[in-house]
Amino acid sequence: MKLIADAVVVGWRRPLTPPLSFTLERGKTVGIQGPNGVGKSTLLAAIAGEAQIFSGVLLRPPTWRIAWLAQHAARPEETPYSGEELLAAYACQRHAPPQRLAQVLPRRLDRISGGEFQLLMLWAVLTQGAELVLLDEPTNHLDHEHIGLAIEEVQNVQKERAILIVSHDHDFLATVAHEVIALSP
C-alpha cells in the first residue's frame, strides 16, 4: 500500500502548486522544499483531505491513519496540562520518550520553551502509530541539539511509517529523507 500523487495540483480557492508526482510507502521518507507560498503546506492539507485537489490524482490507502504536525502547532497558553497529559491525549503513553524529552514531561506546557514544545509535539506525532506522518516545518524553534534529537526520532520510526516532510532546513532533509522534491513558483 502506498500514497500516490500523479500530476496532482492542489490549492484552496485556486491552484497553488505545480503538478506533483511521487509515491510514498512505509519505510520511505519524502521531503518537500521550496520558497514560501508555493503550496508546500497546502499539499499536506490536501493529503489530509482539507485542501482542494484541482487536477491530477491523489490516492491514499483508505485504512491509513494520518498523524500531522502543523507548521505552527497550537500551544495551550496558561493551562495546567503537563507534557505527560499531552502524550496521553495523543495515545503515546506506551512509548518511552528519549531521555532529554522525558525531563520535560512533568512540566506544564505553558512553562517549557518553544523548542521543547516543538520536540514534544514531533515525538507525539511520530509515535502515535499512524501509517502516514505529515510533518510541516518540524525543525521550527529547534536549536542545533534539538534538531539532532529530531533527526534521531524521525530515523527511529522511518521503517514503520510513510513520512512526508515540508522543511526549509536543507541539512535536515538531506539527513532524513530518501527523496527530496523541490517546488518552485
Image (spheres, rainbow, N blue to C red):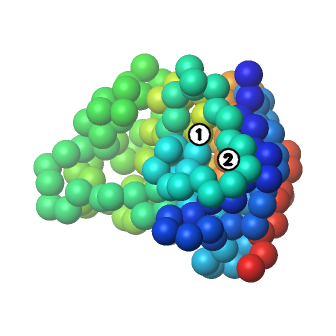
Q: Are marks 1 and 2 in contact (CB under 8 Å)?
A: yes
Q: Residues within 10 Å of mark 1 (few under 14, many from 20)?
A: many
Q: Residue 164: which disc?
A: 2
In the displayed structure image, the side of residue 181 where residue 90 appears, left or right: left
Relative depth, front residue between 51 and 32: 51
Q: Is residue 90 above or below residue 137?
A: above
Check disc 2 and give the amino acid type.
Leu
Quick one: quadrant of the C terminus? bottom right
Residue at image position (79%, 46%) is 6
Residue at image position (30%, 58%) is 75
Residue 167 is at least partly visible in this image: no
- How far apart in space, not on screen, are marks 1 and 2 (Cα)? 6 Å
Check disc 1 and give the amino acid type.
Val
Task: Tell me residue 29's x, y (percent).
Answer: 76, 42
Q: Is residue 148 above or below residue 113?
A: above
Task: Tell me residue 68's x, y (percent).
Answer: 50, 45
Secondary structure under the numbered disc 2 in the rendered image: strand
Task: Tell me residue 26's x, y (percent).
Answer: 73, 28
Secondary structure under the numbered disc 1 in the rendered image: strand
Residue at image position (57%, 64%) is 11
Residue 50 is at least partly visible in this image: yes
Task: Tell me residue 55's x, y (percent).
Answer: 69, 54
In the displayed structure image, the side of residue 11 where residue 91 appears, left or right: left
In the displayed structure image, the side of residue 14 where residue 183 appears, left or right: right
Q: Residue furthest front?
A: 55
Which residue corresponds to mark 1?
Answer: 133
Relative depth, front residue between 103 and 170: 170
Quick one: quadrant of the N terminus? top right
